[in-house]
Image: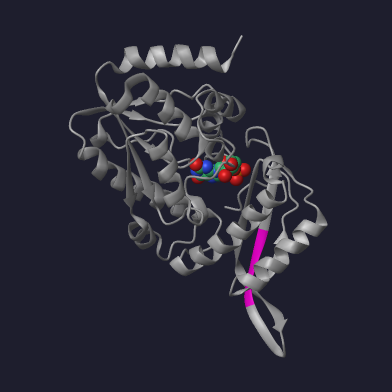
Amino acid sequence: DWTSDTFIDSTVADLKEKIGSDKVVMGLSGGVDSSVAATLIHKAIGDQLTCVFVDNGLLRKNEFEEVLDSYKHMGLNVIGVDAKQRFYDALAGLTDPEAKRKAIGRVFIEVFDDEAHKIEGVKWLGQGTIYPDVIESVSVKGPSATIKSHHNVGGLPDFMKLSVVEPLNTLFKDEVREVGRALEIPESIIGRHPFPGPGLAIRILGDITEDKVKTLQEVDHIFIQGLKNHGLYDQVWQAGAILLPIQSVGVMGDERTYERVVALRAVGSVDGMTADWIHLPYEFLGKMSNEIINRVKGVNRVVYDISSKPPATIEWE
Ligand code: XMP
């Protein structure tokens, strides 16, 4: 029978044997998967592992600094890279969701490759791929298009010439969390909602500007803190806010406003393959709406997404 302890023991033994005295480089995202994968690899080979955590400018508010700190406390050998501007430049003017994903994936690989080249004699690339990523990357919607190109799966450029090590690719999310808890990774990372690799770029419908990112970060922060403060965060599998590409009329004092609309989304799920919208209390939603509209400049309307997957998806792009 599967238990996290036997999984850890056998995986660490396998990793030791497979990697030997080689060096491994791995990108961390702040999420559960890459953090657990890195901790397992670190347990097996210590500082032969170098981690790279890239600030793509599309993370949640304060996320880069906070998570980088946690990683250092966990003893991981981690390099933090501020690449915000490179991502914003690559995204400028792009509106198509897949084009945005591709640009982000491409810049990520460029930035990551720059860092990997600084490590002498690295042979392996660690990845936090979990089982549902493997499935969803090969499944199809319609005749040819893959559902969403998860940029952290497969498709590595030749020039990296690294072998891939993916210790979690047989596990579901709840198993990854169990393993993470057994490894004593902080609850702030283990209990964290999943967050997509392309980050806020796929929650800003239409083109990305730094200004829109800032607006959405503020909205998202109010919502996520609200969920935490009201004891709702752990009852939700994933939550976030979406900045819509429309403006709507509002009124403030004697003035007519014409400002942005944001959607809030909170879903329950086991593995992200299917999901149900969560019936958050009306009181809470009302409070969030007031806080967001009062505190975030340029937003005058908040809506709540009541669609489940299928037929909707969790993300809007
Ligand atoms: P959807 O929107 O397909 O999302 O119902 C299912 C889960 O996958 C995440 N997601 C992504 N993760 N790169 C990622 O790393 C992506 O391009 C991507 N698109 C969606 C989404 O946040 C949800 O957890």
Residue shown at 64%/80% (left/top)?
A: 258
Q: Residue furthest right?
A: 282
Q: Is residue 258 above or below residue 113?
A: below
Q: Position of residue 136 (x, y in %)?
A: 55, 34
Query: What range is drawn magenta here?
Result: 259-263
| Depth check, front residue: 144 or 76 | 76
Q: Position of residue 137 (x, y in %)?
A: 51, 34
Q: Is residue 38 above or below residue 2?
A: below
Colour style of the rendered protein structure: one colour
Residue 218 occupies quadrant:
bottom right
| Depth check, front residue: 314 or 81 | 81
Residue shown at 21%/35% (left/top)?
A: 119
Looking at the rendering, the quadrant in which ligand 1 lies is: top right
Q: Position of residue 141 (x, y in %)?
A: 59, 40
Say whether residue 293 is visible.
yes
Specify whether residue 142 is painted magenta: no
| Depth check, front residue: 183 or 302 | 183
Q: Tally the marks.
A: 0
Q: Is residue 163 above or below residue 15?
A: below
Residue shown at 35%/26% (left/top)?
A: 164
Q: Position of residue 7 (x, y in %)?
A: 51, 15
Q: Residue furthest left?
A: 120
Q: Is residue 158 above or below residue 16?
A: below
Residue 228 vs residue 51: left or right? right
Say whether residue 205 is visible.
no
Q: Residue furthest bottom?
A: 254
Q: Residue furthest front?
A: 73
Predominant secondary structure, magenta span: strand
Work out which quarter of the rendered image holds the N terminus and state it: top right
